Amino acid sequence: MPANKFNGYTDYGIGIGLRIPHYGHILSRKPTVDWFEIISENFMVDGGRPLEVLDEILAQYRVVQHGVAMYFGAADGPNKEHLRRLKILTKRTKTPWLSDHLCWGSVDGTFSHDLLPMPYTMAAARQTAANIRRVRDYLEIPIAVENVSSYTEFHVSEMTEWEFLTEVVELADCGILLDVNNIYVSAQNHGFNPYDYIDHVPHHRVAQMHIAGHTKFEKYILDTHDHPVLDPVWKLYAHATKLCGVTATLLEWDDKIPSFDEVHDEALKANEYIAQAREAKIPAPRARAATSRK
Amino acid sequence: MAAKPQPFAPTKVASTRDLADLQRAMWRVISRPLTADNQMQRIWSDGRRTSQLTAQIAKPNDRLTSFERLEIYNRMYWFRVLDSLYDDCPGLRAALGDAKFIQLAEAYLVKYPSGSFTLRDLPSRLAHFIRSEPRYTRPHTALCHDLARFEWARVVVFDTASQPVFTMNDLLDVSSARQGKLKLALQPYLQLLRLDYPVDDFVLAVKQREAELLRGEASNAPSTRRKVREKKTVLPKRARTHVAVHRLDSRIFFKRLEPAAYRVLTSLREGATLEQALVTGIPRGKKSRVDWAARVQAWFRNWMELGWLCTR
Ligand SMILES: [Fe+2]
């Protein structure tokens, strides 16, 4: 959605992730960019270069915080020290909304540093929603929860991933960061139709979208963020934009990072698909189905 | 009747407790060390087939078994944490060689898996582990212990807080009669190390060689590359060394300290007044007071230029 309560009623355009190899270029050339997404955990420190660079960026650009270690789906709930540091950072960045993943990644105080998939059950949805509410109440800013890519499914699951996502965001009354690349990757790995996914999530809750590149292996696809966006992902993005409206969009490129201009140009390709969506030239979703659901 | 064996993973997730049990079961599988050829171990610690346990957690699909699906996460976990330590410990890695370093890192992470939301903190207990489990670093345990302390100091100095600097003008504001009673603090990021080996020079040499290697690769000149690689790692000889790891304009530097200067700085850090720190730090006898006065003045001038001192 454009401005809505889940993204703090902002109407940001197309952003890219702020990454270390681009610091020099950004600070010296000051290119025009709609906004930067930062990984919160990289700046939850007390001083030094990370915060100096961040302050320079904040003086000139809009910044949105994206986390990778809140683990909304963890059974043990949010970590207090993490929350405390995160809140300090949100005061610095004045991020209009904050996103993290619909996943778990820590057990009994031990961290995996991975985004591990959830079992799709009502009990898991309730626990996740309670965690999201706890985080939002503490930080006092809107939260958007991002769907992850996954490589396994659980026997205990009772619903589809999109039904689970919907349960969680309705129970928590929060936003969605819709990662269309992750939907594509998981659809390929688990054999569902990615258009079904996008058709069935509550579109009015979509606060932001992610696009990224992935890598195809013989038996599965890995969400590597080290490539340009692939064509089927752009098509899904256009479809999602048609349903959700023009939404703040961010290109993720985290590995084998090319020049700033190359990354930014790739992100700006989203404009073509936004234009297509605006003219509603997108074929009906089911006609585009890449795989049929088993 | 024999008790029914406890299932490895819950058969339903109907409560937060079930969720915790499922997450624990999956974590046990994916955090278990990989085999030498980076596969998931086929046999579990109790002799069962690992595939019996993974089958309780994950659904197979038409391309991958439950074992293979969880193996993806098992490999990703170990590659991620080992890569992170690998990047943070170039000196330790050079001293041990890659194979022994990986053995050490794996054993360390089994005993001390990450307890922090950030990978930055991963090496925080490595020096302690090296000393308590010397079998991974013999016969170079003392050297490796120093290297781990030094490389952790580099991590800490990078992003720890700084305080407003104590300047010459601040000093002039204090009457000379009160100067001895002055309590100065050190920048929180400043790391002071008393080492048994000159690992600062060693790490610099290692990093320089890595940079040459990278340049060699970029220039595509195989002969240069070979030459650089063939240079054997020469381990430093034992020599008491005092080093400050500090930062200036966001860059990390190492600075050798005279033993007396190290003692003065550590006393200041512990809360001593200027006068007390000098009494603790400066050896009595031999040299005349006048000699020391000139040196101490030079230290303080330099430390103030580097922004190490702040007011308490
Ligand atoms: Fe994403």
Image (cartoon, coloured by chain):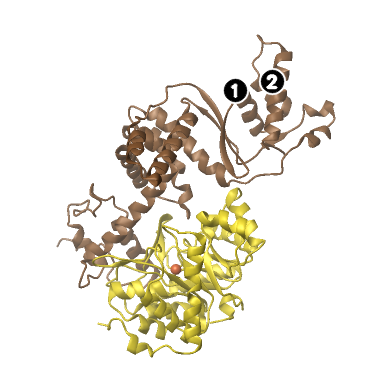
Chain colours: A yellow, B brown
Residue B238 percent coordinates (x, y): 44, 22
In this orientation, which residue lies closer to the viewer: A3 or B18? A3
The earlier-in-sequence mark between 2 and 1 is: 1
Is residue B39 toward the left or the right of residue B92 in the image? left
Q: Which residue is mark 2?
A: B295
Q: Residue at x 36, y 43 (%)?
A: B108
Q: Residues within 10 Å of mark 1 (few under 14, many from 20)?
A: few
Query: Could you tell me which chain the residue with mark 2 belongs to?
Result: B
- Cβ of mark 1 under 8 Å from ligand 1: the answer is no
Does residue B5 show up?
no
Q: Secondary structure at mark 2?
A: helix
Where ligand 1 lies, by quadrant? bottom left
- Residue B184 in sight from this viewpoint: yes
Local SS, label 1: loop
Q: Do marks 2 and 1 share a chain?
A: yes
Against B215, is A149 above or below? Answer: below
Does B82 sit above or below residue A169? above
Residue B195 or residue A82, whichever sits in front? B195
Q: Position of residue A180 (x, y in %)?
A: 42, 75
Q: In this view, which residue lies farthest toward the top?
A: B286
Give the amino acid at mark 2: Arg
Judging by the rendered image, the residue that carries numbered circle 1 is: B258
Q: CA distance from mark 2 to mark 1?
A: 10 Å
Residues under numbered marks 2 and 1 in contact, where contact means CB atoms less than 8 Å apart = yes
Q: Chain of mark 1?
A: B
Tell me: residue B252, above or below residue A24.
Answer: above
